[in-house]
Each structure stands twice: as structure tokens, then as C-alpha cells.
Amino acid sequence: MEMKKRINLELRNRAPEEVTELVLDNCLCVNGEIEGLNDTFKELEFLSMANVELSSLARLPSLNKLRKLELSDNIISGGLEVLAEKCPNLTYLNLSGNKIKDLSTVEALQNLKNLKSLDLFNCEITNLEDYRESIFELLQQITYLDGFDQEDNEAPDSEEEDDEDGDEDDEDEEEDEAGPPEGYEEEEEEEEDEDEDEAGSELGEGEEEVGLSYLMKEEIQDEEDDDDYVEEGEEEEEEEEESLRGEKRKRDAEDDGEEEDD
């Protein structure tokens, strides 16, 4: 895809003056020059044109708010003085993987007074003797060269810092959405457990009372049954005694009759 078409695609129905970041990596530069990018992109702060076969910066528009410029893996060999004229506020410049060979080419970057980080990794200039010392001496405004300062301390990754800030914001949002802290939920659960235990104990007492009353009723019923059984037994004994007395009287009467006959 040609650069001009890619720019129209990346706009996504926005006006150029509304765009602060523009990534055009891996598109195609016709004749090695910038196309479709103009001064209307006045709010642009980050521009990436990596691997677009760019050989010249002559058609770079004025981008006064541009802070970061990615030009890695192109075929740029010179003409860097345009950067100080068109993008005077650059703080980060990546020229790794280009055709930059000598210090005189890089000397044009001295006018970028705000430049803090420069990347020339995988350019032929890195093969020069005392390359790092020479660049730091030539461009005294920079702090990092190829990702490291003069004491070989690694440069912080601004994108990672942004991600960390974003993660912290996400965590705060998640905590807000989550509601009360974990301890609060645990307290609620403990209270619920206590209520359940109390209810259970009350239920247990109630069951014990029911069980006791049931047993008492059974005992009373057993006693009543025993009384009934005793009464029935006594009645039977009385009946037997009466029958025995009747038989005795009958025998006595018979004996008296026999005596009279005699």
C-alpha cells in the first residue's frame, strides 16, 4: 500500500489536525520520498515510518509538536539537517538500520537542542573506532545512544512506563468496581456463619424440647396402659373369686340336701 493511501486509512474519518500519533510502518514510499503528509498534521507528537523504503527527508512537513520520530530500516544516508528545521522539538530519533556511515552526517543533528535519545544501531557508523565516545562528544545534548547512556545504563522504555501507568489505572478501576475490600466480605461471611450457628443451636434446642416432650408423653401413655392392664387383671381375679364362691355355695347347698334326705 502506498503511503498516501495508508495515511488516509489511518485517519479513520478524523481531521489531520486531530491526530497526535501516526504509524505508517511497512507501507511504500514512491521514489523514496514522503507523500500525503503535510502541515495540517500540526498536533502530531509521534510519527513512525519504519521500513517504508524512505531515502529522503526533503518532503517532511513542519511538525513543531513532534517529539518522537521512528525512521528505522530505511535507506536514508544524509539530509538530516531537515529535521532541525521541520521538527525542532524532537526528543527521540530512531535511525537504526539506515545507510549512515560517518560522523559528518550525524553532525547535522547538533541543532536539535531537545534531542535526548538517538538510535543508530545497525548503521555502518557504529563500526567506527570510538564510535560511542565520538557521538557523545559531537552531540552533547543527548543522554542515550542506542538505548544506553555514557555509563552503559539502559534507557527507560517510555512505552513500558505508559503501560504500567495504564495497568495501575486499570487496577484502581477494578478495585472500585469490586466494591468493598476482601476483609469486609469476610466479616459478612463470619456474621452469616454465626447467625446460622445460632439458628442451628436454637433449632437443636427446639428439637430437644420436642424430643423430651415426646418421651414424656410416651412414658405417661405407658403408665396409663399399665394401669389399664392392672385394672383388667383385678377384674378378672374378682370374677374368678366370685365364681369360686358361687360354686362353693352350690356345693354346700347340695350337701345340705343330702343330709335332709337321710
Image (cartoon, rainbow, N blue to C red):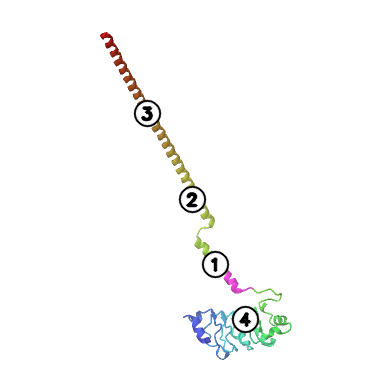
Residue that lies at the very extreme toward the right in this rendered image: 129
Q: Earlier in the sequence, mark 1 or mark 4?
A: 4
What distance separates the C-alpha of mark 2 from that of mark 4?
62 Å
Query: What's the residue type where badge 4 is placed?
Result: Leu
Q: How many marks?
A: 4
Judging by the rendered image, the residue that carries numbered circle 1 is 169
Residue 165 quadrant: bottom right
- Mark closer to the chain start, 1 or 2: 1
Q: As shown in the figure, which amino acid type bears the numbered disc 2?
A: Glu
Looking at the image, residue 28 lies above or below residue 243: below
Q: Secondary structure at mark 1?
A: helix
Q: Which residues are magenta?
A: 156-164
Relative to 34, say whether 252 is above or below.
above
Amino acid type shown at disc 1 = Asp
Q: Nearer the viewer, mark 1 or mark 2?
A: 2
* Residue at far front of view: 262
For numbered disc 4, what is the local secondary structure? strand
Residue neighbourhood size for the residue with mark 2, other residues' Cα within 10 Å, grouped as few (<14), some (14–19), many (≥20): few
- Residue at image coords 62%, 79%: 92
Whole-angstrom CA distance, mark 1 to mark 2, is 34 Å
Q: Are marks 4 and 3 in contact (CB under 8 Å)?
A: no
Q: Which residue is mark 4?
A: 93
